[in-house]
Image: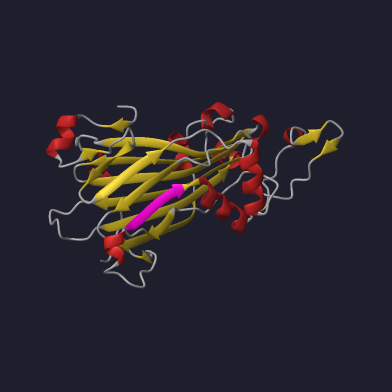
Amino acid sequence: MDNGVGAEKDLMEAGAEALPDDRCGIRINGWQIESCKRSILGSLARREWEEKLGTSHLPEMVFGESSLNLLHLESGCRLHFNAFDALKGWKQESLPPVEVPAAAKWKFRSKPVQQIILDYDYTFTTPYCGSEAIELNCEQLNFKDGCQSPHWEDCDQRINLAALVSNEPILFYDEVILYEDELADNGISLLTVKVRVMPSGWFLLLRYWLRVDRVLMRLRDTRVYCSFSGDKDALPVLLRESCWKEATIQSLVAQGLPADSATYCDPNRISQRLPTVAQKIQRLKISR
């Protein structure tokens, strides 16, 4: 399937159910996982976002009402992925602008006689790894006091990616675009999140991908995995791996790769050739 909920037979065997009322998502093993895809922000909403973020720059296409939400019903722990929080991360990190060739600079002009000074990160690179919150219903509020937001801690335990290639049925899959910019036809800046739910657990990939033609490739990947325990009373443990990779096109050509921009149109094909700049492995243990 391209996206959406899997076959009803597979859902029943896994003890899962599709969300009601035409919502796109699934309930399984104490989790409610839901994706929401909406159109890009209109001009009024863009101005409101610019004011809130303290900037006059946003990506060409911001899917401001699109999101992915994963709620653990018993604890109220909610992970969510959205464009606004990602752009807050971009604004706070404030990387220097990527140097582009003179020919490309010409295209970053608002008027034929006025060149924009690139004094901000026009690639919208973000360190965003997702957002966390505690979302309690009325009954839970009566028993919980002073709840704190979920906290990620560094660990050595890695996600077993090999186990994810098994022949398990996919009960739910979707991809949500959070924002995109074609860099004035000089490449692409894209932030997406994908989720896959199997009978044994769920896995997601939040990916920021940047390609500045003839200049740079950059990937910031965040993978989160939750394995369903056989013990229904056990609280879930989430593993998160974040990795930042990048390389200049010149350095990739020096490795023997072609200079043609078409070579770099698929980040999956090139990611293994990109050196790692930084990485982090973390664990989130949800408490009652």
Q: Looking at the rendering, in which quadrant would you find the C terminus?
A: bottom left
Q: Nearer the viewer, residue 65 or 153?
A: 65
Residue 58 seen anywhere in this rendered image of the structure = no
Name which quarter of the figure residue 27 lies in: top left
Left or right of residue 35: residue 112:
right
Q: Main secondary structure of the magenta part?
A: strand
Pinpoint residue 1: horizontal percent, then vertical percent.
29, 27
Residue range of the region highlighted in magenta in the rendering? 75-81
Q: Position of residue 195 (x, y in %)?
A: 35, 41
Residue at horizontal 33 percent and vertical 61 percent from the top? 283
Q: Nearer the viewer, residue 248 or 206?
A: 206
Q: Nearer the viewer, residue 235 or 187?
A: 235
Q: Is residue 56 magenta?
A: no
- Is the image coloured rainbow, by chain, by secondary structure, or in one colour? secondary structure
In the image: residue 59, left or right of residue 219: right
Query: Residue sitting at 15 percent across and 42 percent down?
Result: 15
Q: Position of residue 168 (x, y in %)?
A: 19, 37
Q: Is residue 208 above or below residue 156?
A: above
Residue extending furthest right?
113
Side of 249 relative to 33 (left or right): right
Q: Is residue 162 above or below residue 127?
A: above
Image coordinates of residue 244 in percent, x first then y, are 49, 51
User: Which residue is depicted at the point 44% across and 34% down?
Assistant: 269
